[in-house]
Image (spheres, grey):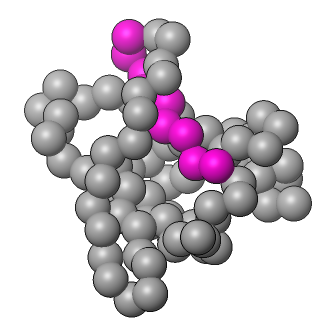
Amino acid sequence: MKMNYYILKNGQLVRKESTVYFIFAKNENSENKSTFVSEIDGDEIHFETENVSDKPEYEKRILPVEQIEAIYAYGRVSLSSGVIS
């Protein structure tokens, strides 16, 4: 099922093979806040994705390409052309 993803933090979108990663700086004060909001059939779902970060000052979240309908970014987000294609 494809979902809309709403990115609520500043960061970078990177694609490796069939996975898109969102990398952002950790903020100690906002550990309980959502990183993504997704929308399925008009219903919003706030959720935390799995943390796969290698560096302690950054977090990396996984977005499987097959599940992405659209990405809406409400912050400064850098991306490469590989994320779009």
Residue closest to the eye, 63 or 57? 63
Residue under the image location 71 percent in, 42 percent down:
19
Q: In the picture provided, is 36 more to the left or to the right than 16?
A: left
Instruction: Tell me, yes or no, if residue 24 can be seen here.
Output: no
Q: Main secondary structure of the magenta part?
A: strand
* Residue at the far top in the pictured view: 55
Give coordinates of residue 82: x percent, y percent.
85, 49
User: Up-down: is 71 above or below 81?
Assistant: below
Residue under the image location 52 percent in, 72 percent down:
4
Q: Quadrant of residue 84?
A: bottom right
Residue under the image location 32 percent in, 83 percent down:
43
Residue under the image location 38 percent in, 56 percent down:
36
Write the start and end of the magenta stretch as one range.
56-64
Instruction: Tell me, yes or no, if residue 5 can be seen here.
Output: yes
Give coordinates of residue 70: x percent, y percent.
61, 73
**25 drawn magenta:** no
| Image quarter (top left, top right, bottom left or bottom right) of the N terminus | bottom right
| Image quarter (top left, top right, bottom left or bottom right) of the C terminus | bottom right
Q: In the picture provided, is 9 more to the left or to the right than 13?
A: left
User: Up-down: is 45 above or below 36?
Assistant: below
Q: Quadrant of residue 8?
A: bottom left
Residue closest to the eye, 68 or 6? 68
Give coordinates of residue 59: x percent, y percent.
42, 27
How many discs mark residues in the rendered view? Answer: 0
Give coordinates of residue 77: x percent, y percent.
55, 52
Residue closest to the eye, 39 or 34? 39
Q: In the picture provided, is 63 more to the left or to the right than 36?
A: right
